[in-house]
Image: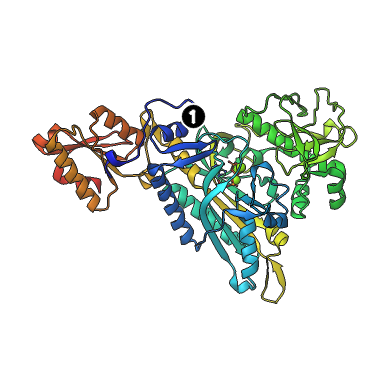
Amino acid sequence: MRTSQMLIPTLREVPAEAEVISHQLLLRAGFIRKSASGIYTYLPLAHRVLKKIMQIVREEMDHQGGQELLMPIVQPAEMWLESGRWHVYGPELFRLKDRHNRDFCLGPTHEEVITILIRGEVRSYKQLPQLLYQIQSKFRDERRPRFGLMRGREFIMKDLYSFDKDEEGLEVSYQKMHAAYTNIFTRCGVQFRPVEADSGAIGGSTTHEFMVLADSGEAAILYCSSCDYAANNEKAAIPAAGLDPSIEKRALEEEITPGQRSAEDVAKFLGITTQQVIKTMIYRTDKELVAALVRGDRDVNEIKLLNALGALTVDLASEEQVKDVSGAPLGYAGPVGIKVRIVADHEVMAMVNGISGANKVDAHLINVNPGRDFKADLIEDIRMVQAGEPCPKCGAQLQEARGIEVGQIFKLGTKYSKALGATFLDENGKEKPIVMGCYGVGVSRTMAAAIEQNHDQDGIIWPASIAPYQVIVIPVSAKDAKQMTIAEELYNELSKLGIEVVLDDRPERPGVKFKDADLIGFPLRVVVGGKATDEGVVEIRQRRSGQTDLIPISDVIKYVR
Ligand code: ATP
Ligand code: MG
Ligand code: MG
Ligand code: MG
């Protein structure tokens, strides 16, 4: 392509709305433009990078036996009602109605659609395992879309779902995806770390997040340099003494997600005490709070960890009303979803029928009455592990880093197959729920994460594997017919060989062209100037190292290849 015919709207100034470097550079280098908050157009250069990442993802998925399919973005509410998630997914779910007033949503993820598909098609153990994936736009109405492509409301994800007949099969699928993800992020040229993660709303089971290490990352990671221990800080948190984490797991497995239920109902169902239920939820709350503090979350107006018991106070300056499914008000939640105030002297401020629990839609309890249901001393020594503390595996000192979650792999078990009735007949003709896993890669977020790690003051430094083009040929003076001829010839030859090359044929000053080339981040820049016409040599500069070589025109192909 010739730059004179391309849409590459570069900007000199740093756009005021962009806080992180990837957002700034994607705007400045003409890769993206905003359409609405968290919703972007990928311009031609960005589209090329995305296609490269998708191709790497495809190759690694296919290599592990993944089969690509494409599911609908628009999903009927019935599927989500059946899985139980319609009422608990909360405001992150984009909901819409058709002309007949029927409810639909835009897919934030596809467990429902794929499990219902498999339910209809798989009967026998002989049809298992199945690994099915798609690469598609996902929609999540994030509370705080930000950092450009990092946290969008529409973004591109690869999601694979595994279906196995038993736990051993799931383990094999999980390890395949672990290996595939390791290859994907290595090939994309980013430094990353798989970390053990907290399984949060899904409860208890194995999960790893793939974190690209970057100061701008929203997640905190603790890792050990003496062994392979690495965990996100939620996983590494030390639970309250006497807390039984299996309560939450059971609650979720039994499909009695606490969200919008009373602690008493949940307790009755599980045959445990109301206090145990509330304590579990408060544990989650506290972890979220501490994580929010660590993140420097601006929406948390004031959170103070007041004393060794972890008593806390929450400033509810920006309370919002929480409503139940029918729209009836349930009570108030602060920016972190908390309406339980615990003051320094451990007395709970009187509040009747409040909401307690974590900063997640499905993680609070209604009708909680502090004082009646629990006391502040329920919050014991929950706290985040800090750098310098001993590694739980080998005892060496833990280190801390920040990370961008670019992928996550997850053992779902039978949560969805049970809820949606996806069963198969085993070798003995016995009906069993299919054992599932889900595995996501943030394709568009990976593009941004690659820039966070690969840039300098002049612009992006694309890893060659995902660069939009490999080479830019720049004639110093577009007015010089001889230079233009040499540049055109080089451009044609490289193109013919299938090398991704751009010719900067604009009638711009050389400084402008060099600046743009650096900003966009072509791995190689070939400059055709006076030396080309006089001595038959061009200057080739490597974007990453800055190394510059004078190369005879006849050797350019050899150099580039
Ligand atoms: P986060 O913790 O950042 O909100 P998540 O855990 O909710 O992400 P998953 O449900 O695990 O995300 O989705 C799989 C992958 O999709 C994530 O690892 C991430 O790379 C990507 N992703 C998730 N949300 C977004 C978003 N809002 N914008 C861009 N990419 C996203
Ligand atoms: Mg999320
Ligand atoms: Mg996450
Ligand atoms: Mg995740």
Q: Nearer the viewer, residue 300 or 516?
A: 516
Q: Is residue 321 left or right of residue 481?
A: right
Instruction: Name the residue furthest bottom.
Output: 428
Crowding at mark 1 (Cα within 10 Å: few <14, some 14-19, many 20+): some
Residue under numbered circle 1: 18
Q: How is the image coloured?
A: rainbow
Q: Is residue 552 visible?
A: no
Find residue 175 and report its horizontal and vertical position in percent.
55, 57
Q: Tell how many labels.
A: 1
Vertical arrangement, residue 539 with respect to residue 491, above or below: above
**Label 1 sits on what residue type?**
Ala
Vertical arrangement, residue 134 with respect to residue 42, above or below: below
* Quadrant observed for ligand 2 in the rendered image: top right
Q: Is residue 143 left or right of residue 354?
A: left
Vertical arrangement, residue 230 with respect to residue 182, above or below: above
Q: Secondary structure at mark 1?
A: loop
Q: Which residue shows up at 44% across the image and 57% down it? A: 59
Instruction: Name the residue furthest front.
Output: 99
Q: Nearer the viewer, residue 24 or 239?
A: 24
Find residue 355 and report its horizontal and vertical position in percent.
80, 36
Instruction: Name the residue furthest left.
Output: 534
Q: Which quadrant would the N terminus be assigned to in this image?
A: top left
Q: Which residue shows up at 68% across the image and 24% down it? A: 301
Q: Is residue 111 visible?
A: yes
Q: Which residue shows up at 73% across the image and 48% down it? A: 87
Q: Is residue 419 left or right of residue 295?
A: right
Q: Quadrant of residue 333?
A: top right
Q: Quadrant of residue 283?
A: top right
The residue at label 1 has a CB less than 8 Å from ligand 1: no
Find residue 132 and report its horizontal and vertical position in percent.
55, 61
Find residue 492 and report its horizontal and vertical position in percent.
20, 48
